Image: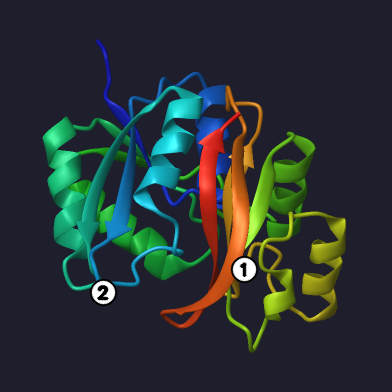
Amino acid sequence: MLLTVFCSWSGGKESTLALQRAIEMGLNIDYLVNMVPKEGSTVGHGLSPEFYSMQAESMQIKIKQKGTDWEEYEESFSDIVRSIDADKGIFGDVYLPDHRGWVEDKSEELGFEPLEPLWNQNPEELYREYLDKGFEGIIVKVKPEKVPEKWLGKTLDEEFLNFLKENDICPLGEGGEYHTATLNGPIFKNRIKVKLERNKKYGNGTIIELEDQRLV
C-alpha cells in the first residue's frame, strides 16, 4: 500500500533535519506543506515563496503552498493536508508542548499519523548533527533583544553556537530568538545561491532580505 507522506516545511534547520531523518527511516516524502504570508502578513520567517520552491526543486519533492495569515493559518494548513489525502506528516518540533499539542490535534482532526523525529532530543546535539551532516544554513531572522542583527546572513557554525550558549539561548532558538534557511545539504541536488540585501523589520523581529536567488 502506497502512503502519502508530507513534511511541514519552514525551510530552516529543524524541518530540514526532521526531513533528513524521515528519509533515513525509509520514508518517501511526497510533499512539502508550506505556509507563505499573504500581503501584509508576517507568517513565516520572511522568506519568499520562490525560495521555498527552489528548496523543493533541489530536493526533487513536490511542494504545496498557500498564502495565509495568523488568523487563517490553521484553516489553510488543513486545506492543504486534506487536498493531498495525507497518511503521515513529518514535523520538526523539539520540546515545546504547545506545538506538539497542535500537531496532535490536527492529526486527529485530519486523519494522518504525526511523526516527530526530533522530539525531546538535546538541542545542542541536534544543532551539531545539522552541521555534521553537511547542511548549510544561514540566519534569516532574529529578535534583536536576544540575537544582535550583526548575525543576520551569517552561516550556522561553532562560533554562533558558542554565542548562544554564552548568552543562555537555546541552541535551536526554540523561543523564536532566531530562524534559519537551508541553502544546501546531502538531500539537495543543487545549492541555492542568494545575495544578502538590507535588514527589515518583520513581525516581532528583523529579517535580512534575500535577492537574486538561484540554483547553482
Q: Is residue 160 above or below residue 40?
A: above
Q: Is residue 175 visible?
A: no
List x then y, in percent, for residue 80.
Answer: 18, 43
List x then y, in percent, for residue 160.
Answer: 80, 64
Quarter location, residue 72:
bottom left
The structure residue drawn at horizontal position 75% and vertical position 58%, both measured from the top left corner, is 124
Nearer the observer, 11 or 91:
11
Nearer the observer, 131 or 198:
198
The structure residue drawn at horizontal position 27% and vertical position 20%, both measured from the top left corner, is 3
For marks 1 and 2, give the one nearer the viewer. Answer: 2
Nearer the observer, 100 or 34:
34
Q: Amino acid at mark 2?
A: Gly
For label 2, the residue is 40
The dot on residue 173 is 1
Quick check: 3 left or right of 198?
A: left
- Quarter of the image for the C terminus: give it: top right
Quick check: 167 left or right of 178?
A: right
The structure residue drawn at horizontal position 66% and vertical position 84%, both measured from the top left corner, is 146
Quarter location, residue 173:
bottom right
